[in-house]
Amino acid sequence: MAALLAASAVMAVLNCAADTLAMFYVFRWFGLHLRFVDLYTIRAATYTLAVINYHAGQLGIIGYLHRAGRVPLPRASAYILFIVGVWVALLLLFAGGSLLLGGAKAAAMTPLLAVFFLGLLVYAVLLRWPPGFLLHGPPADREDSASAPLLIRVGRRLVFRGWRIISKLWAPLMDAGLTGHARAMLVRLPHLAVLLVWHFIALRCFNVQVPVHVAVLYLPVVFAVASLPISVQGLGTSQVAAKYFFTEFAVGGEESVLAYSLSMTAISTASNIIMGLLFLGRGARLGLADMTQSAARGLDSSPAVEPGGGNVPG
């Protein structure tokens, strides 16, 4: 356990660096020339916020983009959604490689992966040949007839508001294109590699003798399950997934796998808190608290979801 804690101290720093590096290049491709050191500080500081509240952590980054990069809040939100989407897609692409292993476990994932790859194909088609309603958004000057029933007027307003938001969020995806999505996945690979090495070390520490190639293909599934917003820090869901995939490789049976998974959840949470506290002071000097609050207020009240405004140069 001491060896795992020592390795985790190093891997936590590398994990934040790899996470920040992927963001750094994605933001640069969107025309945002931010300082890596400042972005690292904000990212590390938001780990503490994310432990308390996931959305608070994301708001901190959105607020930083708004303040430091002069990016309108809706567009900054779209950048973060783009990064999150690329991360989930990368995990599922690796999970798709598990089909090459065959066996009952790979077969059990076939329906989920089939839906994912079908959705990925549809998404690629929409990026290549986007429909007009996504490109242009709803008419800006449309007004509901005062004679229409109240429910119809409210329904129309909700539909048009949702349409404007989707159009606004779609704009950065169109800017990135298929090439930009592929590049975003490439720069995210070091982050995934750090997590794979970290968890592989942990598996070995708990005498779970999973082969390297199996770990590389199944661990992303565990990461994807843990990231689902249906539990706190993936507690419960990640343990179920880990037991399903790795029990057969554990010398001590499912107890060893459960010990590995619970320990990594605890270590991950503790490392996030420690990293966050270490950088929270400098993050505060950069205005992290104000950034988070202004982002929350702006996204709640801003009507800036109209299409066509706030494009970032480059």
Image (cartoon, rainbow, N blue to C red):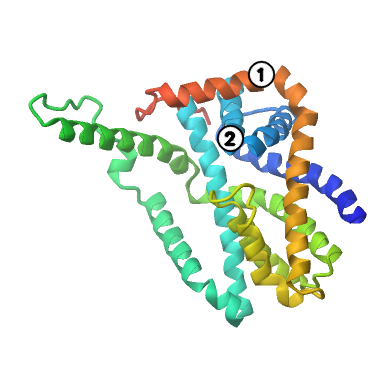
The count of marks equals 2
Q: Residue furthest front?
A: 255
Q: Is residue 90 above or below residue 64?
A: below
Whole-percent x, y for residue 269 in the image: 73, 44
Q: Is residue 256 above or below residue 292?
A: below
- For label 2, the SS is helix
Q: Residue furthest bottom?
A: 103
Q: Is residue 165 above or below residue 224?
A: above
Kindly report the distance in space between the C-alpha atoms of the residues bearing marks 2 and 1: 15 Å
Identify residue for label 2.
58
Whole-percent x, y for residue 293 in the image: 56, 21
Residue 181 appears in the figure? yes
Identify residue for label 1.
287
Tag 2 and tag 1, C-beta contact below 8 Å: no
Q: Amino acid at mark 2?
A: Gln
Whole-percent x, y for residue 137 in the image: 30, 36
Q: Is residue 260 left or right of residue 227?
A: right
Whole-percent x, y for residue 261 in the image: 73, 59
Along the line of sight, which residue is nearer the eye, 270 or 35? Answer: 270
